[in-house]
Amino acid sequence: MKCEQARSLMMAYLDGEPVDQEALADHIARCPECREAWERLRAVERLLREAPVASAPTGFAGRVLARVDRRRRVRRTVLGSLTLIIATAAGGILGLGAAVWSLSGLFQFLDLLLRAAPTLIPRLADVAGTLLRSLCLTVDALTAWLLLLAICGLVAAVAANWVWWRVVRRVQAAATAHP
Amino acid sequence: MDEARWIQQARAGDVESFGRLVRAYQTAVYNLAYRMLGDRMEAEDAAQETFLRAFRHLDRYDPERPFRTWLLSIAAHHCIDRLRRQRPDLPLDPGYLGDEDPDPEAALIRKETRETVQRLLRHLPPTDRAVVVLYYWYGESLRGIAEALGLTVSAVKSRLHRARWRLAQGLEATDEV
């Protein structure tokens, strides 16, 4: 067996694979270099297999959870701030849009009014005069009746209150007598 | 099983359930980080970062795979990245934690063994180191290591073999000093 083959067998053996152990032992017994290499490999194997597990330091889990909590809070703050900024920007854009739209509407209306002013103003004055005259005639005709109606309403309201008060007092008295 | 429930609840954002998972796997993750990085402070930071990443990416966890392997995979990748960024000449940590042995001679031997192991591991490139740690400390199969590190089984095998030879050479150099 050549040294190269023997070294492959050493690895296979350390991997836990089935190997021709007699052939390997025979080569190791005859080859000092492979024997030394094999001893080193076995020593490394022992060291690694015997090395203890390093325990997590005290309070480790608490420190991890504190970092998780801190990151979540930062994330929430950032998300909240972003939402606020986006909402403000959206509100601003909407408001600006509405203002531009309403201003243009106002300008259009003023423009229309100015163009129609020479004919519109006398017509408006006519309509307003007619309306005022109608209103005065109606008030003259209804004043006596309105006055009578107001007095009747007042009397009816006072009577209703007096009756209501009497009924409530009676019910209260009955409830106190028979609890 | 409790673990499956904790994972499900932690996925929904329950920090308390995630805390149970942290307590169950803290030593496994910390030990891997310590063996890979060789420094207690670095190991604690790397182990914490592993859990933070796990919490953030719990939705990517496949429940068909063991949770421990998934966690160790995150830890190994994170440590490999750290080692690649790290200065190669960082001093060796004199040993982790004070697990005092009542017998001074036995304590000395244990300390020497620990230091030798850490010194030997430093001879290895980051990915080979991860292969060795997962193989010897966690008893992971070659296939399990391949899945955890995103390598083929034959690549893991050749890395493991190369690592053994390098460690043997490292031991020889240590003996000569």
Image (cartoon, rainbow, N blue to C red):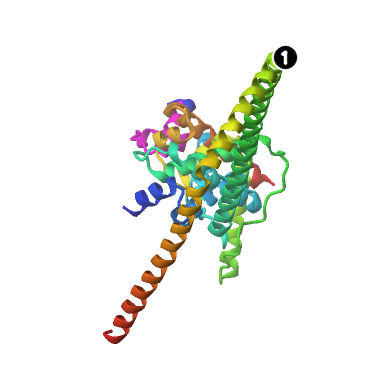
Q: Residue at x 56, y 32 (%)?
A: A134
Quadrant position of residue A157:
bottom left
Residue B32 position, x and y percent, is 53, 47
Q: Can residue A117 be spotted in the picture?
A: yes
Residue B110 position, x and y percent, is 57, 59
Residue A139 position, x and y percent, is 55, 41
Does A18 lie within the magenta span?
A: yes
Residue B28 lies, with reference to residue B140, above or below; the image says: below
Kindly report the secondary structure that dominates the magenta region of the rendered protein. Answer: helix
Please name whichever residue, B91 or A13, is drawn nearer the observer in this view of the structure. Answer: B91
Does B155 lie within the magenta span?
A: no
Quadrant position of residue A174:
bottom left
Quadrant position of residue A152:
bottom left
Amino acid carrying mark 1 in the image: Pro
Residue linked to disc 1: A118
Q: Residue at x 40, y 71 (%)?
A: A162
Q: Is residue B98 left or right of residue B177?
A: left
For mark 1, give the secondary structure. Answer: helix
Please name whichever residue, B13 or B28, is drawn nearer the observer in this view of the structure. Answer: B13
Residue B18 lies, with reference to residue B157, above or below; the image says: below
Q: Which residues are magenta?
A: A5-31
Q: Residue at x 56, y 68 (%)?
A: B101
Q: Residue furthest toward the left?
A: A178
Q: Chain of mark 1?
A: A
Q: Is residue A154 left or right of residue B91?
A: left
